[in-house]
Image (cartoon, rainbow, N blue to C red):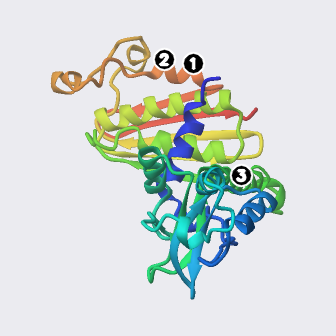
C-alpha cells in the first residue's frame, strides 16, 4: 500500500517536532537489584512487557530484559538477583529530546526500549517504538479534530452571523514588478476559500483567474489592489490598478497578445495578458480601462 504524500509529510513533521515526553509511557514498572529472576519472570508475564529499568534509592542503575531472563533460565539461575544479571551500561534518552532522535537510536542500536530521564537524570518514563507510533497517531488525530473544528466554524460563518446581508471582504495589495512575491495574493485567497469550505472546482477557477489578474497588475501597472467580496452563494472579485491602462481592450482579449517588454518575457512572464483565461474561469467579467489612468476588472463567481 502506497503512502499518501501529504500524510507522510505530516508524520515527518510530527516526528521532528514532538518531544519524547509527549509520547513516552509515564507509568513505568521498575524492579530493584534485589529482585530475583524468578520474581522478574512472573512480573514480565503479568505486565506483558519485555524489560524494565532497575532502580535503587530512586536512581536508575541498570536495565533487565526478557533476554537476560532467558539466559538465566538456560543457566538454571532462577534465584539469581536482577542486580547480578542486569545490563549496567544503559543508554537513555532525554524527555525534552525530539522523537526523531529516538527513532535514529532505535534504528542504529536495535534496542527494544529506552529509559527516559529528565534534565537531572531522574527516571520519568520509558519509550518503545510502539509508544512512538501511538503518540504520533494520537497527535495526528488531535490535529485532525482541530482542523475539522476550524473548517466547521469557517463553513458556518455566514450562518452564525446575524445580518440582513453578510459578506466577507478580503483585500490583497500587488506591487509593480515584485516577482519575488508574485502569486501570493492568489495563494492567500485560495487558502481562505479552502477554510471557508468552498468546493475544490470553484476554488480552482477563482485561483486561476486571480493569479492571471495578479500577474497582469504586477507586470503592466504601477501597482494595484485585489478585493474579494465573499457572500454565502456568490463571490465578486475586483482588480483595480493604476498605470498606463490598455489602449485596445479587444486586442488585449486575443490569446498571446501582450505589451510586456522583452526583459519581463525573459523572466518567464508576460507571454500573454491572460484575459482569456480569466474570462473562461469567471461566470461574469467586466473590464474597463482608461489610458493614462488605469484598469478595473470585475469578476463574478457563483459559489457551489
Q: Tell me if 33 is positioned left or right of 245 in this view.
A: right
Inter-mark Cα distance, 3 to 2 = 44 Å
Q: Could you tell me if the residues under marks 2 and 1 are in contact, i.e. CB atoms within 8 Å? A: yes
Residue at the top extreme? Answer: 255
Q: Could you tell me if the residues under marks 3 and 1 are in contact, i.e. CB atoms within 8 Å? A: no
- Which tag, 3 or 1, sits closer to the chain's start? 3
Residue 292's spot in the image, x, y percent?
29, 37
Which quarter of the image is occupied by the C terminus?
top right
Residue 279's spot in the image, x, y percent?
55, 21
Identify residue for label 2. 276
Inter-mark Cα distance, 2 to 1 = 6 Å
Inter-mark Cα distance, 3 to 1 = 40 Å
Q: Element under label 2?
A: helix
Residue 292 appears in the picture as rendered: yes
Foreground of the two, 274 or 160: 160
Residue 56 vertical placement versus 91 (above, below): below
Name the residue rendered at 69%, 47% in the picture: 196
Q: Quarter of the image holding residue 126?
A: bottom right
Identify residue for label 3. 141
Decide: few, some or many residues near mark 1? Use Cα within 10 Å; few <14, some 14-19, many ≥20. few
Foreground of the two, 56 or 9: 56
Residue 157 vertical placement versus 79 (above, below): above
Residue 163 appears in the picture as rendered: no
- Which tag, 3 or 2, sits closer to the chain's start? 3
Amino acid at each position: 500500500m502506497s503512502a499518501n504524500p501529504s500524510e507522510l509529510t505530516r508524520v515527518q513533521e510530527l516526528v521532528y517536532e514532538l518531544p519524547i515526553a509527549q509520547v513516552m509511557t509515564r507509568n513505568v514498572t521498575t524492579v530493584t537489584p534485589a529482585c530475583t529472576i524468578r520474581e522478574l519472570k512472573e512480573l514480565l508475564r503479568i505486565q506483558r512487557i519485555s524489560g524494565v529499568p532497575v532502580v535503587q534509592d530512586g536512581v536508575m542503575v541498570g536495565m533487565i530484559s526478557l533476554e537476560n531472563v532467558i539466559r538465566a533460565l538456560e543457566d538454571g539461575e532462577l534465584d539469581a538477583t536482577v542486580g547480578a544479571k542486569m545490563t549496567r551500561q544503559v543508554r537513555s534518552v532525554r524527555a525534552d529530546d525530539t522523537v526523531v532522535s529516538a527513532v535514529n537510536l532505535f534504528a542504529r542500536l536495535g534496542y527494544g526500549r529506552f529509559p527516559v530521564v529528565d534534565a537531572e537524570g531522574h527516571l520519568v518514563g520509558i519509550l518503545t517504538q510502539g509508544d512512538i507510533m501511538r503518540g504520533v497517531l494520537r497527535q495526528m488525530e488531535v490535529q485532525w479534530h482541530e482542523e475539522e473544528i476550524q473548517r466547521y466554524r469557517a463553513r458556518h460563518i455566514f450562518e452564525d452571523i446575524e445580518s440582513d446581508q453578510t459578506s466577507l471582504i478580503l483585500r490583497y495589495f500587488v506591487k509593480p514588478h515584485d516577482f519575488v512575491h508574485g502569486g501570493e495574493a492568489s495563494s492567500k485567497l485560495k487558502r481562505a476559500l479552502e477554510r471557508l469550505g468552498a468546493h475544490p472546482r470553484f476554488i480552482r477557477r477563482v485561483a486561476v483567474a486571480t493569479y492571471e489578474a495578479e500577474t497582469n497588475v504586477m507586470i503592466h501597472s504601477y501597482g494595484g489592489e485585489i478585493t474579494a467580496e465573499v457572500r454565502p452563494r456568490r463571490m465578486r472579485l475586483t482588480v483595480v490598478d493604476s498605470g498606463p491602462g490598455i489602449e485596445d481592450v479587444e486586442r488585449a482579449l486575443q490569446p498571446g497578445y501582450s505589451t510586456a517588454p522583452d526583459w519581463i518575457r525573459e523572466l518567464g512572464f508576460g507571454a500573454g495578458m491572460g484575459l482569456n483565461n480569466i474570462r473562461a474561469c469567471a461566470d461574469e467579467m467586466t473590464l474597463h480601462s482608461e489610458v493614462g489612468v488605469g484598469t478595473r476588472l470585475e469578476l463574478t463567481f457563483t459559489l457551489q
